[in-house]
Image (cartoon, rainbow, N blue to C red):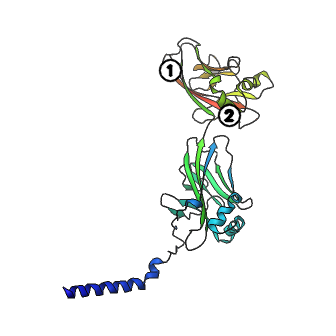
């Protein structure tokens, strides 16, 4: 028994000597190669979280002035903003994406010029020309800004994150500042509604615009009274009613009113037509006195028929001012 204990103690002693001999190997920081993505040292104080909402048809760049975070750059990276910008040029500062799911830096090459990336609707880094491109992020060294922008093809309802950071170039990226953008694509210009049109030739259902006065004012920039008094068919106004293609979302900007103005007759595909044409099925007319959008039926239509249509209103003097109804209409 004593011999066994002596051998055991001797073995432990030798292991201890070996461990001490290699102590530096176990305690020194890992040096990352060019092909490795360094781990992210989690630091809430070094993280700036921003909600960025983009409205379809009214996309404007979201810009962060880096000087607004000068104190944070000095605290976390030991640099002024000017030094960070200079560091991007001389390689002492890096600008990369961050993969939060794996808690690592993503050293993917820039895809938007030399200072930024494209992203698809899932927030995945993409290249110019790829499908489903939704947003971009880039640094403008001249204005010392970080810019996030939504692309024209971005679809309402899209939600994802862009996570980028500036880091001191060294054996690790522990000295950093990161910006996490919660990106959402919204469309406050759309009003969804379902209606039932009573049985009987030319009967209609009225959509009361009073119920949507706040939406109209937000999107058009006018009170409801000013809105109904500003239509262009009477001369002098700038508000026009248009039909909008349900599938492509393209506005019909060429058709003249074919029903009581402002209004249109529509065929069974919700395309503008004239009364009596083959397939004519519905009419959409805005009664400005009543402040009501009427959706009515043509004669001799079968009960149960269902139609999807979109009626839009826009300010012809300002492309950013518009809204539209997407309507499901069922015939009794």
Going from N to C along the chain, the mark reached first, 1 or 2, is 2
User: Where's residue 207, x and y in %?
Assistant: 61, 21
Q: Note whether 76 is above or below 161 in the view shown.
A: below
Look at discs 1 and 2 and give the one toward the viewer: 2
Q: Disc number at residue 205? A: none
- Give left or right: position of 152 versus 124: right
Q: Answer yes or no: do the residues labelled 1 and 2 have beta carbons within 8 Å?
A: no
- Looking at the rendered structure, the secondary structure element under dot 1 is loop
| SS at badge 2 | helix
Residue sticking out furthest to the left? 1
- The answer to whether 129 is drawn above or below residue 263 in the figure is below
Tell which residue pokes out farthest to the top in this image: 200
Q: What percent of the width, then of the height, locates residue 218?
A: 68, 34
For label 1, the residue is 305
Pick whichever, 295 or 103, lies toward us: 103
Q: Count neighbours of disc 1 (C-alpha within 10 A) and say few if under 14, some if 14 to 19, many if 20 or more.
A: few
- x, y percent for residue 189: 63, 34
Q: Name above or below for residue 76 compared with residue 271.
A: below
* Label 2 sits on residue: 218
């Amino acid at each position: 028994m004593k011999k066994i204990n002596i051998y055991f103690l001797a073995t432990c002693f030798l292991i201890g000597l070996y461990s001490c001999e290699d102590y530096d190997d176990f305690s020194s920081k890992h040096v990352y190669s060019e092909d490795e993505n360094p781990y992210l040292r989690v630091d809430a104080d070094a993280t700036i979280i921003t909600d960025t909402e983009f409205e379809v048809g009214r996309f404007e760049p979201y810009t962060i002035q880096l000087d607004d975070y000068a104190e944070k750059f000095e605290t976390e990276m030991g640099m002024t903003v000017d030094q960070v910008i200079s560091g991007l040029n001389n390689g002492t500062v890096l600008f990369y994406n961050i993969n939060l799911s794996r808690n690592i830096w993503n050293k993917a090459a820039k895809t938007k010029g030399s200072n930024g990336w494209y992203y698809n609707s899932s927030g995945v880094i993409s290249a110019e020309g790829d499908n489903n491109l939704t947003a971009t992020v880039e640094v403008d060294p001249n204005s010392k800004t970080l810019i996030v922008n939504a692309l024209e093809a971005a679809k309402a309802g899209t939600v994802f994150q862009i996570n980028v950071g500036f880091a001191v170039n060294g054996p690790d990226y522990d000295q950093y500042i990161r910006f996490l953008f919660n990106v959402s694509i919204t469309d406050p210009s759309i009003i969804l509604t379902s209606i039932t049109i009573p049985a009987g030739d030319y009967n209609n259902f009225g959509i009361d615009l009073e119920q949507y006065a706040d939406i109209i004012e937000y999107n058009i920039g006018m009170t409801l009274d000013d809105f109904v008094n500003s239509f262009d068919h009477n001369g002098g106004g700038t508000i026009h009613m248009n039909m909008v293609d349900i599938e492509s979302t393209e506005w019909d900007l060429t058709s003249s009113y074919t029903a009581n103005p402002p209004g249109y007759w529509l065929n069974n595909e919700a395309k503008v037509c004239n009364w009596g044409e083959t397939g004519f099925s519905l009419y959409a007319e805005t009664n400005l006195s009543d402040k009501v959008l009427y959706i009515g039926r043509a004669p001799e239509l079968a009960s149960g028929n269902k139609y999807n249509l979109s009626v839009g209103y826009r300010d012809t003097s300002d492309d950013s001012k518009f809204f539209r109804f997407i309507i499901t209409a069922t015939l009794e």
